[in-house]
Amino acid sequence: MPFVRISLPKKLSQETKENISISIHESLIQEFNIPEDDYFHVIEELETTQIKFPKSYLGITHSENIIYVQITAGQGRTKEQKTKLYAQIATRISSTTEILKNDIIIILLENNGSENWSFGNGEIQEPKHLKQ
């Protein structure tokens, strides 16, 4: 049940923005085994003056094409799954857009249980793929 917020420069083309979202979704399907229709993304287009970042951090350089990908998902994935997800997202985005891997910042926030989600009607739903 990931929810994805993508913050990026407004100047990027609509095609680039779409490819970024699709790349993230396909990576989540592959590495986190989410259903294909579990596709909840918000793309925030920001002016360059609204995006703050260092030119270099931890030995990684950044440019004005920096994007922030914040994923909120349920707990339970291993460090290996997370590592593969980050690599897959960066590879897919960089191969389908002009965004370089070093300009892709990924933040994963985990929450616990379906009681932290409502997918409509003001109710807590428990998706069938989470029931045991």
Image (spheres, grey):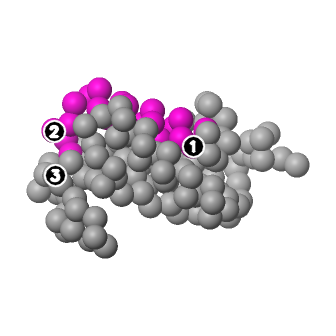
Spot the residue most to the left.
Answer: 49
Name the residue type under label 1.
Leu
* Label 3, label 1: how far apart the Cα atoms are: 26 Å
Mark sitting on residue 4: none
Q: In the rendered view, would you say 35 is above or below 70?
A: above
In the rendered image, residue 118, in percent from the top left (x then y), is placed at 62, 48
Callout 3 amino acid: Glu
Q: Mark 1 = which residue?
A: 28
Establish if 118 lies above or below 40.
below
Please tell me in which quadrant of the rendered image residue 74 appears: bottom right
Mark 1 or mark 2: whose residue is earlier in sequence: 2
Q: Which residue is mark 2?
A: 11
Asked if the residue under mark 1 is in contact with the one under mark 3, i.e. CB atoms within 8 Å, the reply is no
Q: Nearer the viewer, residue 60 or 40?
A: 60
Placement of 50 over or under 94, stated as above or below? below
Circle 3 residue: 64
| Residue 24 belongs to magenta span | yes
Sequence order check, earlier mark of 2 and 3: 2
Q: Nearer the viewer, mark 1 or mark 2?
A: 1
